[in-house]
Amino acid sequence: MSSAARAATGVVLLGGLVALTGCGAGGQGRATAVPTLTVQAGGDPVTVQPTQYCRGGEGERYQVSPPVIEVAPDTTVVLTVADEVAGFGWGVQVFDEQLQERIGEVEVEDGTTVFDGINTSDVVPATYYLVVVQDSDPEACNGLSGAWPVGFIRAGGGTPATSPSASPTG
């Protein structure tokens, strides 16, 4: 997927997070669980739940709070996705501490399940979010796909002045 297409996909995906509060539990009771993400940056692995996901042709949104982890400077971030996410392709979007403004994007090779190409010191602000965004199928779920946000506070960089909002604006 081209950078322009992936960027457009991200706008659709992350812009959809605005409606989180009205979506309820979205797929509770379904036989198959939505895929999670595992992130590790020097400490124990952290499991990240999606805020949205396209399953069976239906877009689902989930009311979850993204984890925020404190990390040391110059530490490799290891992201592990489920095979079904890797099969569609995915990338990483970098957002500010409020999860409002996208400040960067990292391409991930299709089929990758484990990615370690991000360092905690790669991002200029000390507090930021990485959002794993699954490539979408424009024919399914109106282009909505999976999104897994996780916040980082780099040690020695201070803490956010305010807590992040529940959803980005795109």
Image (cartoon, rainbow, N blue to C red):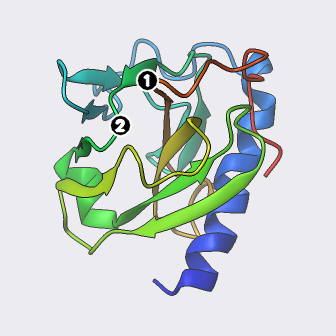
Report x, y in % for residue 76: 23, 46
- Residue type at tag 1: Ala
Depicted 37 relative to depicted 55: above or below = above
Judged left or right of residue 97, residue 58 is left
Mark 2 burial class by Cα count in 10 Å: few <14, some 14-19, many 20+: some
Depicted 25 relative to depicted 150: above or below = above
Q: Nearer the viewer, residue 10 or 125?
A: 125
Depicted 153 relative to depicted 111: above or below = above
Residue furthest to the front in view is 156
Q: Which residue is mark 2?
A: 73
Q: Which residue is mark 1?
A: 155
Q: Are marks 2 and 1 in contact (CB under 8 Å)?
A: yes
Q: Nearer the viewer, residue 169 or 130?
A: 130
Instruction: Tell me which residue sits at (72%, 25%) in the image.
Output: 20
Q: Quadrant of residue 77?
A: top left
Judged left or right of residue 69, residue 44 is left
Instruction: Tell me which residue sits at (32%, 50%) in the image.
Output: 119
